[in-house]
Image (tube, grey):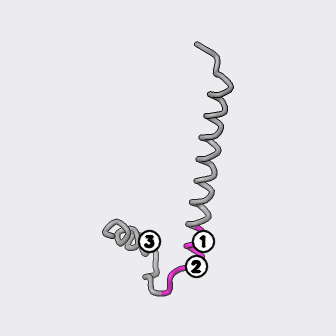
Amino acid sequence: MQPRTNAGRRTRNTVVLALIIAGLWASFALTRGATHPDESAPVGPVAHFSRAVELIRG
């Protein structure tokens, strides 16, 4: 097997860093949405399912 090149390591590290940042951003967005619910939205344990269906339907 060939050893990894510096460019290959840099590319892999960049991709991993981008995925970590995207995951953190998504977690922050979900947490913020959960802590500041829309007053017109339904509440309860399955309210997020109705929101998901609404998003899918457009």
In the image, 48 versus 32, the foreground residue is: 32
In the drawing, what numbered circle is on residue 36? 2
| Numbered disc 2: secondary structure | loop
Q: Which residue is mark 3?
A: 48
Q: Amino acid at mark 1?
A: Arg
Q: Amino acid at mark 2?
A: His
Q: Which residue is mark 1?
A: 32
Closer to the N terminus: mark 1 or mark 3?
1
Local packing at callout 1 (Cα closer than 10 Å; few below 14, some 14-19, many 20+) is few
User: Which corner quadrant holds the C terminus?
Assistant: bottom left
Q: Amino acid at mark 3?
A: His
Marks 3 and 2, how far apart at CA? 13 Å
Marks 2 and 1, how far apart at CA? 6 Å
Image point 61% across, 34% down: which residue? 12
Image point 38% across, 69% down: which residue? 55
Image point 60% across, 71% down: which residue? 32
- Please give the range of residues in magenta: 31-39
